[in-house]
Image (tube, grey):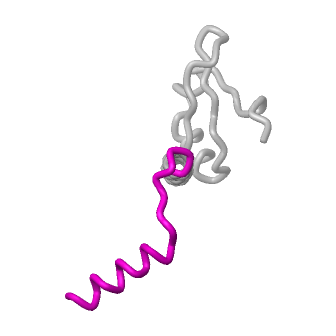
Amino acid sequence: MRYSSQVKPISYLRANTAKVLAQLADQREPLIITQNGEAKAVLQDVASFEETQKALALLKILALSNQDVAAGKIKPMAEVLARLRAKRSID
């Protein structure tokens, strides 16, 4: 995705807030806001933000899992299943 077409100065945002919000919801592409010619902020619609947060959470879980594997904090599946079955039969 190219963001070069999705760059607007903060003055554009001030003058066209409703239009910008509608475009964000429709196009679901982030908008880079500049101030004095420098990128200062990124705006995105709420649905895209939530999707990004879910993806980041999943990546964090995967990274933590990889750390556990590298540290040897794993157990054979058969052992785990046996413990679960034993616990289930006790309850």
Please say if 89 is above or below 13: below
Q: Nearer the viewer, residue 44 or 15?
A: 44
Q: Main secondary structure of the magenta part?
A: helix
Spot occupied by residue 15 in the image (x, y as percentages of width and height): 55, 27
* Viewport quadrant of the N terminus: top right
Q: What is the magenta range?
A: 69-91
Spot occupied by residue 57 in the image (x, y as percentages of width and height): 48, 50
Q: Nearer the viewer, residue 5 or 85?
A: 85
In-image side of 33 versus 79 (left or right): right
Q: Is residue 78 magenta?
A: yes
* Image quadrant assignment for residue 29: top right
Residue depicted at x 63% and y 20%: 9
Spot occupied by residue 44 in the image (x, y as percentages of width and height): 56, 41
Spot occupied by residue 14 in the image (x, y as percentages of width and height): 52, 25
Residue depicted at x 49% and y 77%: 78
Q: Nearer the viewer, residue 35 or 47?
A: 47
Residue depicted at x 51% and y 73%: 77
In-image side of 8 versus 64 (left or right): right
Please say if 85 is above or below 27: below
Kindly give the residue lying farthest to the left in the view shown.
91
Q: How many numbered marks are there?
A: 0
* Image quadrant assignment for residue 91: bottom left
Q: Is residue 85 magenta?
A: yes
